[in-house]
Amino acid sequence: MTRWTGSLALIASLLAVPSAAQNPEPDTRAGVIEAEQAQKITELHPFVPGKVEQYLNWASTLLGPGEAWHPFFNNAYSGGGFTVGAGYNK
Protein backbone atom coordinates (compact mmCIF):
# COMPACT_ATOMS: atom_id res chain seq x y z
CA MET A 1 0.00 0.00 0.00
CA THR A 2 2.84 2.37 0.72
CA ARG A 3 4.21 1.76 -2.71
CA TRP A 4 0.82 2.47 -4.25
CA THR A 5 0.43 5.74 -2.29
CA GLY A 6 3.96 6.86 -3.15
CA SER A 7 3.53 6.23 -6.86
CA LEU A 8 0.14 7.94 -6.82
CA ALA A 9 1.67 10.99 -5.14
CA LEU A 10 4.51 10.99 -7.69
CA ILE A 11 2.07 10.84 -10.62
CA ALA A 12 -0.10 13.59 -9.11
CA SER A 13 2.90 15.85 -8.60
CA LEU A 14 4.11 15.31 -12.18
CA LEU A 15 0.70 16.04 -13.66
CA ALA A 16 0.05 19.08 -11.54
CA VAL A 17 -0.28 22.33 -13.45
CA PRO A 18 2.07 24.99 -12.19
CA SER A 19 0.11 27.75 -10.54
CA ALA A 20 0.17 31.12 -12.23
CA ALA A 21 1.53 34.05 -10.34
CA GLN A 22 -0.88 36.71 -9.24
CA ASN A 23 -1.47 39.52 -11.66
CA PRO A 24 0.59 42.55 -10.72
CA GLU A 25 -1.38 45.38 -9.19
CA PRO A 26 -2.33 48.06 -11.66
CA ASP A 27 -0.24 51.20 -11.49
CA THR A 28 -1.20 53.61 -8.80
CA ARG A 29 -2.34 57.10 -9.71
CA ALA A 30 0.96 58.53 -8.50
CA GLY A 31 2.85 56.09 -10.73
CA VAL A 32 0.79 57.05 -13.76
CA ILE A 33 1.37 60.77 -13.10
CA GLU A 34 5.12 60.21 -12.69
CA ALA A 35 5.26 58.34 -16.00
CA GLU A 36 3.36 61.12 -17.80
CA GLN A 37 5.67 63.77 -16.32
CA ALA A 38 8.76 61.80 -17.34
CA GLN A 39 7.43 61.60 -20.89
CA LYS A 40 6.57 65.32 -20.90
CA ILE A 41 10.15 66.21 -19.89
CA THR A 42 11.47 64.66 -23.10
CA GLU A 43 9.11 66.81 -25.20
CA LEU A 44 9.92 70.26 -23.77
CA HIS A 45 10.27 73.18 -26.17
CA PRO A 46 10.24 76.98 -25.81
CA PHE A 47 6.93 78.82 -26.02
CA VAL A 48 6.02 79.99 -29.51
CA PRO A 49 3.27 82.65 -29.65
CA GLY A 50 0.43 82.22 -32.12
CA LYS A 51 -0.32 84.58 -35.01
CA VAL A 52 -2.75 86.74 -33.04
CA GLU A 53 -0.34 87.12 -30.13
CA GLN A 54 2.50 87.96 -32.52
CA TYR A 55 0.35 90.70 -34.08
CA LEU A 56 -0.64 92.10 -30.70
CA ASN A 57 2.99 92.10 -29.56
CA TRP A 58 3.95 93.89 -32.78
CA ALA A 59 1.21 96.51 -32.27
CA SER A 60 2.25 97.05 -28.65
CA THR A 61 5.92 97.42 -29.65
CA LEU A 62 5.07 99.76 -32.54
CA LEU A 63 3.19 102.16 -30.32
CA GLY A 64 5.87 101.66 -27.70
CA PRO A 65 5.93 102.30 -23.96
CA GLY A 66 6.47 105.86 -22.79
CA GLU A 67 4.18 107.29 -25.43
CA ALA A 68 1.07 109.13 -24.31
CA TRP A 69 -1.37 106.78 -26.07
CA HIS A 70 -0.87 103.03 -26.12
CA PRO A 71 -2.96 99.92 -26.80
CA PHE A 72 -4.69 98.46 -23.75
CA PHE A 73 -5.45 94.72 -23.76
CA ASN A 74 -6.23 94.08 -20.08
CA ASN A 75 -9.61 93.77 -18.41
CA ALA A 76 -10.42 95.35 -15.07
CA TYR A 77 -12.18 92.18 -13.86
CA SER A 78 -10.61 88.76 -13.51
CA GLY A 79 -12.15 86.44 -16.09
CA GLY A 80 -13.93 89.31 -17.80
CA GLY A 81 -12.86 88.23 -21.27
CA PHE A 82 -10.79 89.94 -23.94
CA THR A 83 -10.82 93.71 -23.92
CA VAL A 84 -9.33 96.01 -26.54
CA GLY A 85 -8.95 99.67 -25.87
CA ALA A 86 -6.61 102.60 -25.60
CA GLY A 87 -4.65 103.70 -22.58
CA TYR A 88 -3.04 107.02 -21.80
CA ASN A 89 0.23 107.51 -19.90
CA LYS A 90 0.48 110.75 -18.01
Image: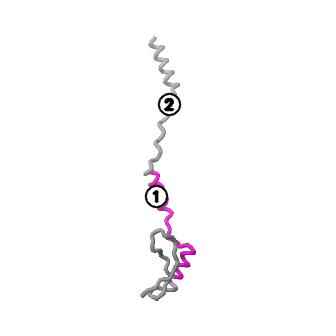
Residue that appears at 46% across and 15% down: 5
Q: Name the spot of residue 43 as percent of width and height, x first.
A: 51, 63
Residue that appears at 46% across and 17% down: 6
Crowdedness near tag 1: few (<14), some (14–19) or many (≥20) residues, C-alpha within 10 Å = few
Question: Residue 67's mark?
Answer: none
Q: Give the residue furthest to the right.
A: 51
Q: Is residue 44 magenta?
A: yes
Total numbered labels: 2
Q: Which of the pair 5/39 is nearer the observer? A: 39
Q: Nearer the viewer, mark 2 or mark 1?
A: 1
Q: Identify the mark nearer the N-term, 2 or 1.
A: 2
Q: Name the spot of residue 29 as percent of width and height, x first.
A: 45, 50
Q: Amino acid at mark 1?
A: Gln
13 to 40, vertically: above or below: above
Crowdedness near tag 2: few (<14), some (14–19) or many (≥20) residues, C-alpha within 10 Å = few
Q: Is residue 30 magenta?
A: no
26 to 55, vertically: above or below: above
Question: Residue 18's mark?
Answer: 2
Question: Residue 37's mark?
Answer: 1
Badge 2 marks a residue whose secondary structure is loop
Q: Name the spot of residue 61 as percent of width and height, x first.
A: 50, 83
Q: Name the spot of residue 50 as percent of width and height, x first.
A: 55, 72
Label 2 and label 1: CA atoms lie apart by 39 Å
Q: Which of the pair 54/41 is nearer the observer? A: 54
- Magenta segment, principal secondary structure? helix
Q: Amino acid at mark 2?
A: Pro
Q: Quadrant of the C terminus?
A: bottom left
Magenta-colored span: 31-59
